[in-house]
Image (tube, helix red, strand yellow):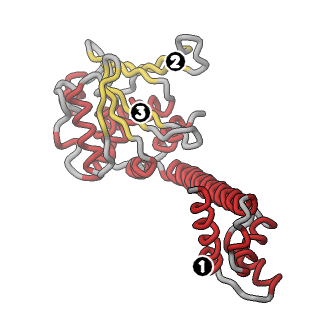
Amino acid sequence: MSFTGNVKSEVFLLDRILPEKISELSAILYHSEIDDIIKVTTENASVARFSFKAIKEIYDISPKITVRKGYNFKKGYIYILEIKEKIDLIIRELGLNTLLPPTYLYDDEDLERAYLRGVFLMTGSVNDPKTSRYHLEMLFQSEEYAKFIQKLLNDFRLNAKVIKKDNKYMVYLKEAEKISDFLRIIKAMNAVMYFEDIRIYRDHKNMTNRLNNCEQANVDKMIESSYELIKKIELLKKKDMYELLDEKVKEVAEYRLKYPEVSLSELSEIISIETGNKITKSGLHHRLKKIELLAEKVRD
C-alpha cells in the first residue's frame, strides 16, 4: 500500500464525536455527484468504509455499495456509494448545495481538523518521505473552494499554496515540516512518526554529505595552495635566489617540499617534533609568506 493509503487507513480508525463525523462527511460528499441520488466514487476502501458508516449512523440509511475493477489496467478497485434516501435533508444539513460549506461545519479547531481530514481522505495525496521530494496535494474543481481550503490550512500556519493544474486547482504543501504538521493535525500519528524518522535520517544524510563536500573542497584548496608554494620555491632555486632566504625560512621550505599534501597545522606539528623547535601555524604561515613575496619579486 502507498504512503497515502496508509495515512487514510490510519485516519479511518480514529474515534470521532458526532459533530466531527458530520464535518468530515460533508467534506467527502462535497466532492460527490449529486442528481436524483448522491454518488460517492473513491479508490480508497477506507474512504468508502467511513462514508458508509457515517451515513448509516447519522441518517439511519444504508447506501448501496458497488465495487468494480479500476480503469486503465489498475490493480486496485473503485468503490461507489449511492445514497437514494433523504437526499434533500443530507444536501441541506451538509451544505452540499452551496459554493462553500456553512461555517457551523468548521467553526472551532476540532471541526476544522475534521473537515480537513475529510478533504484529504477524498482528494489528497502525499509522497512517501523516502522519495526525492516532499509533496502533499489536494485537487479541486473550483478555485473558490481551493482558496477556502488554503485558508483552513493556513489557519494552522502551514504555508499552503494554490496553483492551477490543467482544468483543476491544486492546494499543496512542499515543506517537510509543514507536511508533518498537517499529518499531526488530522491525527495520523503513526504516519507522523514514520515521516519524521525518514525526514531526520534524510536531513542528517544531506548534512553529512554537505560537510564531506565542504571538507573535500578545503582539502583540494589546501593541496592547490601547497603546490603553488612549491612552484615558487622551485622558481627561487632555479633563479639562484633561494639562498637569500634566512635559515628558518629555508627550513620550512624544505619541509613543505618533503610534505606537500599536509595542512599547515599538520606541517607545524611535524616541524616541531622533528626539529625540537616548536613552531605555531601562525609562525609557519609568516615564514611561508616570505617565500611568496620573494618569488613575486623574482617574477616581476
Give the residue type that dot 2 points to. Val
Query: In this image, 90 relative to 113: left or right?
Result: left
Q: Residues within 10 Å of mark 2 (few under 14, many from 20)?
A: some
Q: CA distance from mark 3 to mark 1?
A: 60 Å
- Could you say whether the residue bearing mark 2 is in a helix, strand or loop? strand
Q: Is residue 85 above or below residue 255?
A: above
Q: Is residue 134 above or below residue 261?
A: above
Question: Is 35 or 114 nearer to us in this picture?
Answer: 114
Image mark for residue 282:
1
Q: Is residue 256 above or below residue 133?
A: below
Q: Nearer the viewer, mark 3 or mark 1?
A: 1
Question: Is 89 or 279 nearer to us in this picture?
Answer: 279
What percent of the width, then of the height, locates residue 8?
48, 38
Give the residue type that dot 3 points to. Gly
Q: What residue is drawn where x is 83% and y is 82%?
A: 274
- Residue that label 3 marks: 124
